[in-house]
Amino acid sequence: MDDAERRRAADARNSARELRRAGLYAEDEPLWKEDFPLTSAGEEYIQRRQFTRYLLATSAAFAVGTAGAAAWANLQSANHGEAQRIVELDKVANGSEYLFSYPTDKDPALLIRLPDGELRAFSQKCTHLGCVVYYQPENERIFCPCHHGVFEPSTGDATAGPPERPLQKIDIEVRNGVVWAKGMEV
Ligand code: FES
């Protein structure tokens, strides 16, 4: 260490002692802080303030992200698939089913006419592992033969067996005596 360096080190130590005298160092501050007076009295305060700003910025980013996701979900259509003619209503008796494909030729679907004449339509794919389900009016259920999954015919809800999710619903409408599919629930 040359003379200039020794002088600078002494100056730094003196500055630290002045800070201690001025009460800016706590009594229990470690000695090395006297030799290396690189901190300032306001450092802790500044760090807290920066942390608070960081927290506010993070919270604001989350809020903006959540609002954006909600807006995007609202813009999305609840259904997908083009309107498609299924069958004449009088060809489907009460308590029977009619098989068709929707929304594409590769998607088997099920139109059910309940005993009271109400219509329901669902994807024919079981929500367990995708087997094809059938309407069993005698048992008042939609049944999956693969693992004996059972669905409620008026709602499509899973009621027994391994499936936990309801069948995917197809929105239908009768126009001039013809049943139409209007879209599939996403
Ligand atoms: S695939 Fe339908 S119950 Fe398993």
Image (cartoon, rainbow, N blue to C red):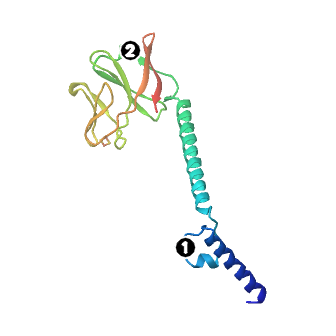
**Image height check: is 31 above or below 163?**
below
- Label ID, residue 29: 1
SS class of the residue under badge 2?
helix
Q: Mark 1: which amino acid?
A: Glu
Which quadrant of the structure image shows residue 50? Answer: bottom right
Q: Is residue 140 left or right of residue 48?
A: left
Contact between labelled residues 1 and 2, with CB atoms less than 8 Å apart:
no
Task: State the residue at coordinates (26%, 18%).
Answer: 115
Residue 121 pos. (x, y %): 38, 25
Question: Of residues 88 and 67, which is closer to you in this image?
Answer: 67
SS class of the residue under badge 1?
loop
Label 2: few (<14), some or many (≥20) within 10 Å? some
Residue 16 pos. (x, y %): 65, 74
Q: Residue furthest top?
A: 176
State the CA–CA distance, disc 2 to disc 1.
Answer: 88 Å
Task: State the residue at coordinates (68%, 78%).
Answer: 14
Q: Is residue 5 left or right of residue 56?
A: right
**Image height check: is 95 above or below 142?**
above
Q: Mark 2: which amino acid?
A: Leu
Question: Ligand 1 closer than 8 Å to the CB at disc 2?
Answer: no
Task: State the residue at coordinates (60%, 51%).
Answer: 53
Q: Give the quarter of the figure containing the N terminus.
A: bottom right
Label 2 or label 1, whichever lies nearer to me, is 1
**Which residue does the numbered mark 2 point to in the structure image?**
89
Q: Is residue 10 left or right of residue 170?
A: right
Question: Of residues 99 and 16, which is closer to you in this image?
Answer: 16
Label 1: few (<14), some or many (≥20) within 10 Å? few
Question: Of residues 149 and 30, which is closer to you in this image?
Answer: 30
Residue 145 pos. (x, y %): 27, 39
